[in-house]
Structures are given as structure tokens and as C-alpha cells.
Image (tube, rainbow, N blue to C red):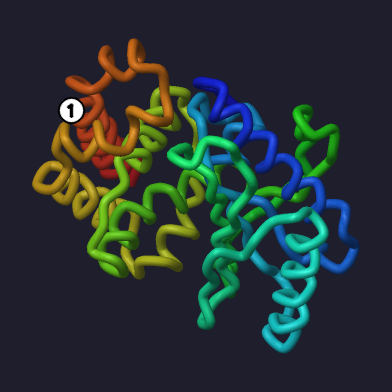
Amino acid sequence: MITLNSQDAIHKAWLYRVLIAIVDNSNLRGLYFKGGTCASMAGFLDRFSVDLDFDYVGEKKYLTKLRYELENTFENLGLEIKDASVKVPQFFLKYPTKNISARNTLKIDINFPPPKANVYKAIRLVDIDRVVICQDIATMFANKLVAVLDRFDRNNSIAGRDIYDIHHFFINDYDYNKDVIIERTGLNSIDFFKKLSAFITDQITETILSQDLNQLIPYERFNKLRKILKRETIMFLNDEIVRLKNSK
């Protein structure tokens, strides 16, 4: 994970503290790690990430117990639950900081039920010296691809980091889990990539990218990427459409 400044280092310390507490709790074994922080810690991504995301692979009847266990974990760490969703296990945790204008909130997001097509593997996360069950890279990539449209459909929002991550995964030649795309969207890969390419073409602006990414990657790198990020991501998507058509 990339540390940008001293405040980010403090945030990262709390991220790790919460993650270790969750991983070490035998009552929370049904939580499988995913998302940007997971990808960064596993070495698949090169940006700073501020939240913790998990899939819950247990049974629905245990969700209340899961929530209670998490709340106890946060309390034991001295964290204040600033806000929480009543519909899904989602928490906004406030950690102590002397700088009242600095970031001091950590979001925990738990997805249930996760796609059946998700694939998980044990990955050693060196930063916390733990072996953690995580989404594999192909599953991370597929879910990140879907997240662009899903985020807009659910919340009418767009995250520039989604575009950055997709670009990074493509340029590193990672594979994606096609079954996740089909399960989550009901579309085959070609139709999905056409829809995603059109959405990015129409909706993504340099302003959107700047608002999100200028806090997550060093300015020098972002300044080099911002004028090519959208164009190259669309190129990767369109090239993948051609490759899929030719492979039929």
C-alpha cells in the first residue's frame, strides 16, 4: 500500500489494526477480504486505499451475530461507531486524531450474499504478517469492472478510482472472472464491455478522476495519467471486445 503523507500513515495504521482484529477473531472467519485495500496489500494495486471491504460467506441467520461481534471488536479497539447501516453490515468508524480537520473516519463494508462465481484464495499479507482468505485477482478484477455501472445504478455516483483500478489491472495483463460478470449483470462479456465502454465514454470526465484520485496517488503520477487514463481504459475495453469476438 502506498503512503502519501503522515495523515495517511495514521489512517493506514488504523486500517491494519482493525483488519488484524477481524482476521484474528475466530467468530469472524466468514469474512473474506476484498476491494482496493486488499488488492493493494496483496501487491495487485499501487494506490492508497482508505476502506476495508469484505464478502460474508456465511448464512443469513448469523448476520445479527456477525454485527454484534464486529461492534464488540470496534469497541475493544477504542473506535466510535459514527454511523451504521440498518440494512447491511456497513460501519463508519471514527478514530482519535488531534487534527480535527484531518481524515478520521474508516469505512467497513460487508457484502452479502457475494456472487457464487467469486473465487477465493489464501494470500499472505506481509504488512500485517497474516495469511488471509481474499478474493483472487481475477475475481477482484471482474467485480471492479462491474462496480463502475453498479455504483451508478445504485447510488447515481461515479468513483474515479474504479477507472484507475481497471486501467491498472488491464495494463498488468491480469485475467478477469467472466462468470462473475455474467452472474452480476446478466450480460455476456462482449455486451458487458460494450456497455461499460459507452458509459465511460459518456460519463467519465477529468474532473471526476481528479476529485477521487488526487488523494490516492502521488500528484506527479496522477498528473501524467489524467490525460490518458480515460482514453487508454476505453482502448483496453474495445480491444477486449475485438479479442473476444475473434476467439469465438
> Which residue type does callout 1 highlight?
Arg
* Residue 10 percent across, percent down from the top left: 63, 32
Q: Quadrant of residue 233?
A: top left
Q: Where is residue 242 in the image (x, y as percent from the top left)?
A: 24, 37
In the image, residue 113 sits, relative to residue 141, either above or below, namely below
Q: Position of residue 70 (x, y in %)?
A: 74, 67
Residue that protrudes farthest toward the left in the picture: 202
The residue located at (82%, 59%) in the rendering is 76
Where is 76 relative to 121, above or below?
below
Circle 1 — which element?
helix
Residue 186 lies left or right of residue 136; in this view the side is left
Residue farthest bottom in this picture: 61
User: Can you say which quadrant of the picture contains the N terminus?
Assistant: top right
Is 243 located above or below residue 30 in the figure? above
Q: Nearer the viewer, residue 74 or 170?
A: 74
Q: How crowded is mark 1: few (under 14 residues within 10 Å), some or many (20 or more)?
A: few
Q: How many marks can you see?
A: 1
Image check: 148 left or right of 33? Answer: left
- Horizontal arrangement in the rendering, residue 5 relative to residue 127 (left or right): left
Who's the residue at 41% across and 35% down the image? Answer: 165
Residue at (41% x, 63% y) in the render: 182
Q: For this rendering, which residue is in front, 103 or 19?
A: 103
Residue 89: percent from left, percent from top? 60, 72
Residue at the spot of label 1 = 231
The residue under the point 72% across, 62% down is 31
